[in-house]
Image (cartoon, grey):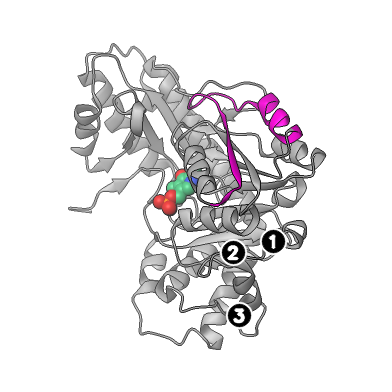
Amino acid sequence: MEDELLLMLPGPVPLPERVRSAMARQAINHRGAEFGNAYADIVRVLKDLFGTKNNPLVISGSGTSGMEAAVSNFGKGRKIAHLINGKFGERMYTIGQRYASEALPVVSDWGTPLNLEALKSALEGGCEVVTMVHNETSAGILNPGEEVGKICRKYDALFIMDGVTSIGGDNVQADKWGVDVAVVGSQKCLAAPAGLAAVSVSGRAWERAVNNPPYYLDLMAYKKNAAKDPMETPYTPAVPLFLALREACLIIEEEGIEKRILRHHKMAKAVRSAVGAWGLDMFPKIDAFHQYSNTVTAVCIPPNSNDKDFRGTVKNFSIQIAGGQDHLKDKIFRIGHMGAVSAPELLATLAATEFAIRKTGHKVTDSGVMAAAEVLG
Ligand SMILES: *Cc1c(COP(=O)(O)O)cnc(C)c1O
């Protein structure tokens, strides 16, 4: 559409028409059946996406509010080990510094494998809580939820996992992996508007909830209100966003979770084929436990180019891709392929990106668009 950018970002993502329409309606009482039913629909779908039997709690705040809720309700006054290999891992650590008795960073370079041996030492040193970002959006790397879950159980630590850009787009099995607290944000793989977070909490974590959580983000208050019939939130929620998220969840249910994950995997594979054909390097360094992200692909920018010109060229086609954050600015570009998008959006994005790559003078011998089409077709 004219004057409308196609957002191929790791959030926010394009919103299906049904999701947008759900927001454009008369106000409703948030302590009534209509709201309660919407909340119940959201929870029914989200719990399958999280891979948990526990009911996720929905907070009126962006993904970071969910991260802060997780750390403050289960890590306040405790020793926390923070696995870090990108910007959102660093954010978890920054939050930890506000709440923990001691926040211990377990650092790897951005986009490189987490240091699981250092994590074990931290746990031997008495850390009671661990944070990990499952899909590290800043670097396009998928971290090992199952493996870290096993380590946490072995040392009887609580495991907080940021699943903001994996839940709803990639396979997450919170219960099976031993994830105690998992977090998702609305504007990423769920293809809902920005402004909501959902947090699931294991029984084990509830038993260890701190007794002095923050007021607005007191998850026990969310739990008590969600247990009412009709379901409620403790304070007035962002009702239009709940209605939009409900519609996004119904769309997910109609597609089917397995099909949705396969679609994301296929898109990721197509982008990686294009990257290979272009002769560019993937940014993350992976190993047996770490994989390339299936929801956002981080690629080293062609030599002799810069972020502004490169993404500017792509934007001339009304398509927006992401650059690198912090020290990765001018070093990488990132293509988001999460939410409701599929082959049409992806092929257009790869064509615009290929044009931008050729324009930098980088010699491309094979067409990335054709390589991706082979995967998608
Ligand atoms: C986007 C994102 C968040 C949350 O960011 P908000 O801007 O607060 O929604 C958290 N973690 C990861 C991995 C993300 O990609």
Q: Position of residue 246 (x, y in %)?
A: 51, 69
Q: Earlier in the sequence, mark 3 or mark 1?
A: 1
Report how far apart the C-alphas of labels 1 and 2 lie in the structure: 8 Å
Q: Does residue 272 show up?
A: yes
Task: Give the residue drawn at x 39%, y 14%.
Answer: 279
Amino acid at pointer 1: Ala
Within 10 Å of disc 3 (Cα), the crowding (few <14, some 14-19, many 20+) is many
**According to the image, label 3 marks what residue?**
231
Task: Give the residue drawn at x 46%, y 31%.
Answer: 139
Q: Is mark 2 within 8 Å of ligand 1?
A: no
Report how far apart the C-alphas of labels 3 and 1 lie in the structure: 22 Å
Q: Position of residue 324 (x, y in %)?
A: 35, 31
Q: Position of residue 375 (x, y in %)?
A: 50, 30
Q: Which mark is residue 186?
A: none
Left or right? Give the position of 195 relative to 144.
left
- Is residue 329 a member of the stretch shown in magenta? no
Q: Which residues are magenta?
A: 99-124
**According to the image, label 1 marks what residue?**
209
Quadrant where the N terminus sits is bottom left
Query: Which one is in front in this view, the residue at disc 3 or the one at disc 2?
Result: 2
Task: Give the residue drawn at x 39%, y 39%.
Answer: 346
Image vertical order of residue 95 relative to residue 280, above or below: below
**According to the image, label 2 marks what residue?**
213
Left or right? Give the position of 214 relative to 13.
right
Left or right? Give the position of 123 relative to 238.
right
- Is residue 106 a member of the stretch shown in magenta? yes
Amino acid at pointer 3: Met
Amino acid at pointer 2: Pro
Secondary structure under badge 2? loop
